[in-house]
């Protein structure tokens, strides 16, 4: 029932409240009016008996007067007046009580009724005797009628007085009761008015409370405070509809602000990554430029070129110098942007060629490449430093032919680049240092100058996660494996 009331429109609620209050006041007024009418009827009843006796007294006087007039004048008009007054008196006395009772008033009323009947009989006989010219008889009957007339008047007077005193006491009691009822009625009306006012106040308060809450929340929103709780919608009327709409609006604004905040935070993180990547790339480029003027590295490289020129002629020397040019040109041009896996593999090819020229083909290089992944993007100058690390810290410290295998393959939506060697391998402590981006030992004197810490840092920034590479070794003398994981479908750092 309560839920149905809450679901009613506001207009119907207000109309219902007004009708209910008016109906309550109307019912109370009707009850009080009926009670007052009943009290008034009781008061009228108190004096009705006295009025009746007074009318009987007047009627018997009319009978006596009309009889006397007829006896004096003996006219038809006086006779007609007599019959009319006698008929009226007889009808009036019929209403008097004739029951045998212990009440004094009842006995007196019964006596009046009986004497009235005897009086009418005597008066009738007197008139008949007058009309029959029986002087003696009508005189005797007249005297008897007059005597009864006196008795009846005395009885009526006494009965009237008795009833008046009795009615006066009853009237006082009823007047007291009426005043009590009047006071009680006023108290009821006051209570009804007070209760009605409280009811109206409570109902209007229940209707206005959501509006006050809604107005307060709207004022907070207007001041720019969107961190507010929702306003409870307690009904399904117009106020409930507006309240739910306001809650949805605030929730939408809060979601929008949160999205803007998250977007700003993501943009800040992206800017930081861009700055860090740019810093690392500039550091790598600087180290490459420094490596280009490293006297020892250049001396060894040019010395190998001179020996090759003396032994095999200018063509191979030209090829060697061309490969070196491509190697250094890549370092200079590609060092500040994103490249493809294919471009990085080409740099590794050139680097292995140069090393094999320098070290008489001591490094056996094998490739297993998925051609569909060569266009996947990655940071520049990543694979060559890892291969260089394999050569300097693995193959060059072993006896026999060194082997390096480059594998590129897909694993679900991830492009995997694995670099394996059969070199000296690493213990767990060395593997852990490399995972943390710290060099396993001092850099070799002919290194290009890019440390593994720089490689790992740029990989993490590019991939957006720390799980973008892995380093494994089965132990000293059992080689090592470096694996890079690149998201094929994910966003790329530019």
Image: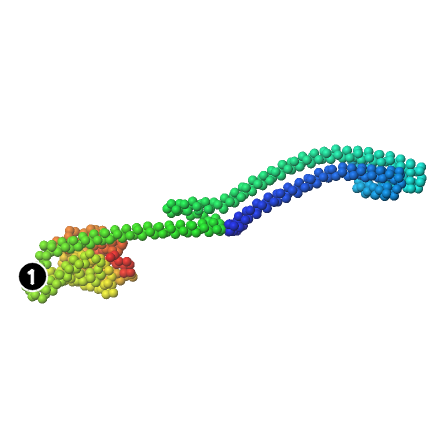
Neighbor class of circle 1 (other Cα within 10 Å; few <14, some 14-19, many 20+) is some
Q: Is residue 492 left or right of residue 107?
A: left
The answer to which of 33 and 210 lies nearer the viewer is 33
Question: Image height check: is 150 above or below 409?
Answer: above
Horizontal and vertical percent position of residue 487: 27, 59
Camera sees residue 193: yes
When asked about the image quadrant of residue 474, the answer is bottom left
Residue 357 on image: x %, y %: 11, 62
**Residue 174 location in percent, x, y?**
69, 36
Q: Is residue 96 left or right of residue 192?
A: right
Q: Residue at x 12, y 53 (%)?
A: 445
Q: Which of the pair 336/208 is nearer the observer?
A: 208
Q: Quadrant of the C terminus?
A: bottom left
Q: How many numbered marks does the figure carry? A: 1
69 and 29: which is toward the camera = 69
Q: Is residue 164 above or below residue 7?
A: above
- When the figure is inspected, residue 408 is found, relative to residue 73, above or below; the finding is below
Q: How is the image coloured?
A: rainbow
Quadrant of residue 368 in the image? bottom left
Residue at 62% of width from left, 39% of height from top? 185
Instruction: Please give the residue where the numbered disc 1 appears in the rendered image.
Output: 306
Is label 1 in a helix, a strand or a loop? helix
Relative to 276, is 130 above or below?
A: above
Q: Position of residue 401 (x, y in %)?
A: 14, 61
- The residue drawn where x is 91% and y is 36% is 140
- In the image, taking residue 210 as reference, residue 225 lies left or right, namely left
> Can see residue 114?
no
């Amino acid at each position: 029932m309560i839920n149905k009331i809450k679901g009613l429109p506001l207009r119907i609620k207000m109309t219902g409240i007004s009708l209910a209050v008016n109906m309550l006041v109307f019912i109370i007024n009707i009850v009080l009016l009926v009670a007052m009418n009943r009290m008034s009827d009781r008061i009228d009843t108190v004096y009705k008996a006295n009025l009746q006796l007074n009318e009987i007294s007047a009627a018997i006087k009319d009978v006596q007067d009309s009889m006397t007039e007829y006896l004096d004048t003996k006219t038809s008009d006086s006779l007609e007046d007599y019959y009319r007054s006698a008929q009226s008196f007889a009808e009036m006395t019929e209403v008097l009580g004739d029951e045998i009772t212990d009440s004094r008033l009842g006995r007196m009323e019964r006596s009046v009724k009986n004497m009235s009947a005897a009086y009418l009989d005597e008066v009738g006989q007197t008139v008949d005797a007058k009309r029959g010219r029986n002087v003696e008889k009508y005189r005797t009957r007249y005297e008897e009628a007059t005597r009864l007339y006196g008795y009846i008047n005395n009885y009526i007077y006494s009965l009237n007085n008795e009833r008046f005193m009795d009615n006066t006491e009853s009237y006082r009691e009823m007047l007291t009761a009426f005043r009590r009822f009047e006071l009680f009625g006023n108290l009821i009306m006051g209570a009804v008015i007070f209760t009605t006012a409280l009811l109206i106040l409570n109902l209007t308060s229940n209707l206005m409370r959501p509006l006050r809450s809604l107005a307060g929340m709207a004022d907070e929103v207007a001041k720019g405070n969107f961190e507010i709780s929702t306003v409870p919608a307690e009904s399904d009327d117009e106020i409930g509809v507006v309240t739910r709409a306001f809650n949805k609006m605030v929730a939408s604004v809060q979601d929008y602000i949160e999205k803007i905040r998250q977007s700003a935070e993501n943009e800040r993180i992206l800017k930081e990554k861009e700055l860090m990547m740019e810093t690392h790339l500039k550091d790598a480029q600087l180290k490459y430029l420094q490596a280009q003027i490293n006297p020892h590295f250049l001396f060894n490289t040019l010395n190998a070129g001179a020996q090759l020129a003396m032994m095999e002629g200018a063509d191979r020397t030209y090829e060697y110098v061309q490969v070196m040019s491509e190697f250094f040109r890549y370092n200079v041009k590609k060092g500040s942007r994103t490249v493809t896996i294919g471009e990085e593999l080409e740099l590794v090819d050139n680097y292995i060629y140069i090393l094999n020229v320098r070290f008489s083909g001591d490094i056996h290089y094998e490739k297993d490449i998925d051609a569909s992944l060569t266009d996947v993007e990655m940071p520049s100058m990543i694979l060559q430093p890892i291969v260089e690390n394999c050569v300097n810290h693995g193959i060059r410290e072993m006896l026999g032919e060194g082997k390096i295998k480059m594998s590129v393959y897909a694993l679900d939506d991830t492009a995997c680049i694995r670099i394996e060697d059969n070199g000296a391998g690493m213990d767990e402590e060395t593997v852990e240092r490399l995972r943390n981006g710290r060099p396993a030992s001092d850099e070799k004197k002919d290194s290009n100058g890019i440390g593994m810490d720089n490689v790992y840092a740029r990989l993490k920034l590019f991939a957006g996660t720390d799980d973008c590479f892995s380093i494994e070794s089965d132990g000293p003398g059992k080689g090592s494996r470096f694996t890079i994981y690149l998201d094929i479908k994910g966003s790329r750092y530019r």
